[in-house]
Image (spheres, grey):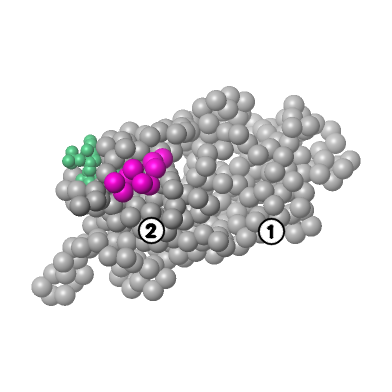
Amino acid sequence: MVREWDPRNASSAEIASLLDTLNAVLAADLPQDPPWRESSLREYLSEVMPGERRISWIAQAEPAEDGTPGLLLGHVNVLLLGGIGVLEVLVHPAARRTGLGRELVRVSARRVWDEGFQSIGVEVVGDTPAVAFYESLGFAREYVETRSVLDLNAVDWPALAEMATGVGAGYHLEFCPGGPPDELIEAYARAKAEVRDVDDGELRPSSYDPERLRDSLTTLHRRGMKPYIVLALHEQTGEVAGLTEVVVPAQHPTRADQYDTIVVRDHRGYGIDRAIKARMLLELRSAEPELVEVQTWNAQANEAMLKVNAELGYRPDREWCEYGVDVAELVHRLDPPR
Ligand SMILES: CC(C)(COP(=O)(O)OP(=O)(O)OC[C@H]1O[C@@H](n2cnc3c(N)ncnc32)[C@H](O)[C@@H]1OP(=O)(O)O)[C@@H](O)C(=O)NCCC(=O)NCCS
């Protein structure tokens, strides 16, 4: 029932069926999250950074007698990057607790092993069945973040406009829809590299050199995800002193994702974090009229950033955890040698 599946040449009916299953999963596990749309979903599932590969499988029920394709019961994909395989597993709520999730992990873990990778990581949302599922398979919790959500309808816009101008003398802010301008790519990459945030989890690696940064912007665009950036520029040196990145995905354009926010060490204490995030929200309000929420992920230890987010109106929502497992152990557990 489980078969390898390539979204690049899948039928439109299969893509639509996957979307239905994804939305059934969201409705069951994260009912406050907006449902996904089909827009650029194929590209979202297919496009990867250079040097990375994503392999997918689906499980589909038998077709009906009149030939109507069967319900897409489950989906798994694994992204092979660096030395790790990053797993995403979905089982339709109507097909849960029948062993399908375990079977999808078995098939994909076997491939990760065959490809010579040593570990598997997965993002697990707190307070969902996935926690007990991955723990039952021997995955261990390696890192925890808090997801927070900002409701734009509850924002105090005049206060926000004030925050956006509250940056120290000697800096100015620049809004860059689509990504940093080419002449600033190197300075941008330097800012990201300097603050290689120890709090960053492993599953969402940032881009630290100009070439990788360009690749990651191209990949985002191809996947239907529109990046917006606000920069704080240090006027004296022309250096990027701070940056904040938000992505509006075509698949759920009412809820944007806040990616990295970085203030370079020498430029901390001048109100840059608060100002760039406030400016971003003001700009998004006119650039993306459909947008109603922004979500962000922070390490629980990152108190300074959590404080600014609370001032902006972000409310903590869920724990977002990274789990990991040794591939050999997982394969041995799920596919013991006979
Ligand atoms: C996690 C998930 C893949 C599990 O799929 P599944 O097919 O129900 O899992 P299985 O039937 O293979 O379960 C294997 C084991 O996991 C554990 N498990 C799974 N669901 C569980 C639950 N709700 N409570 C407790 N244990 C659970 C059990 O030990 C189970 O074995 P058992 O049924 O013999 O007791 C499925 O719930 C899912 O798709 N969740 C959404 C995942 C996701 O990524 N969501 C992203 C947006 S929220």
- Read off the magenta span: 324-332
By secondary structure, the bulk of the magenta-drawn segment is best described as: helix
Task: Tell whether circle 2 marks a residue whose Cβ is less than 8 angstroms from ligand 1.
Answer: no
Q: Is residue 123 magenta?
A: no
Tag 2 residue: 114
Quarter location, residue 275? top right
Identify the residue shown where x is 27% and y is 44%. Answer: 333
The residue at the point 38 percent across, 58 percent down is 114
Identify residue type, mark 1.
Glu
Q: Residue furthest left?
A: 65
- Residue at left 50%, top 64%? 47
Marks counted in the figure total 2
313 or 72: nearer the eye?
72
Could you say where residue 131 lies in the image, as x and y percent from the top left? 32, 36
Q: Evaluate if marks 2 and 1 touch, with contact meaning CB atoms under 8 Å apart.
A: no
- Say if residue 129 shows up in the picture: no
Q: Residue at x 40, y 61 (%)?
A: 55
Residue 135 seen anywhere in this rendered image of the structure: yes
In-image side of 290 versus 122 (left or right): right
Residue 296 numbered tag: none
Which mark is nearer the camera, 2 or 1?
Answer: 2
Residue 134 x/y as whole percent: 31, 40
| Placement of 121 over or under 268, stated as above or below | below
CA distance for labels 2 and 1 = 30 Å
Q: Which mark is drawn over residue 211?
A: 1
Would residue 65 appear left or right of 186 to someone viewing this image?
Answer: left
Which class describes the residues within 10 Å of circle 2: few (<14), some (14-19), or many (20+)? few
Residue 168, x across and y down, in percent: 80, 31
Query: Is 329 or 78 nearer to us in this picture?
Result: 329
Residue type indicated by callout 2 = Asp
In the picture, measured across the screen, residue 254 lies left or right of residue 24, that is: right
